[in-house]
Image: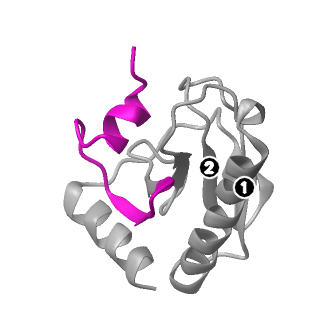
Amino acid sequence: MSSIFSKIVNGDLPCYRVAEDDLFLAFLDVNPLVKGHVLVVPKQEVDYIFDLEDDLLAGLTLFAKKVAIKMKRILPCDRIGVTVIGLEVPHAHIHLMPINSIADMDFSKPKKKFDSAELTKIAKSISEA
């Protein structure tokens, strides 16, 4: 069975696309911890990030770096935080979040809500940065 991220990659579900190439996709988390929370996934469905082939894992990291640089340009923050948890969706992914403190990456906090217009605006701003 395809993961929700595979359905997004395949175009079966919509997303707020931030960046894409032949191997990877970055899109806004629709249940973000902070404004501008981005998920970066390989298009190939692999459950556990450390089960990715070495070249794919390296490529995912470099792709995430490009996205993080764009995020830092347009989102007010001290850093772009990076985390991999890998329990919530059985598809390897990286969370990129604009942060000012470690508390900004507390996954036990309530998720933020943004309307479609705001998510579209954020995705477009990052994409064009």
Q: Residue at x 46, y 54 (%)?
A: 25
Write down the region rendered in magenta: 1-25
* Left or right: residue 68 compared with residue 43: right
Q: Which residue is mark 2?
A: 95
Q: Residue at x 57, y 70 (%)?
A: 67
* Cα separation between marks 1 and 2: 6 Å
- Measured from the top left, where is residue 23 in percent x and y? 51, 54
Q: Which mark is residue 82?
A: 1
- As for residue 19 lying within the magenta part, the answer is yes
The amino acid type found where label 1 is placed reads Val
Q: Nearer the viewer, residue 124 or 78?
A: 124
Residue found at the far top of this picture: 1
**Residue 88, above or below 105:** above
Q: Residues within 10 Å of mark 2 (few under 14, many from 20)?
A: many
Answer with mark 1 or mark 2, whichever residue precedes in sequence: 1
Q: Are marks 1 and 2 in contact (CB under 8 Å)?
A: yes
Q: How many marks?
A: 2
Image quarter hosting the N terminus: top left
**Residue 83 visible, this orientation:** yes
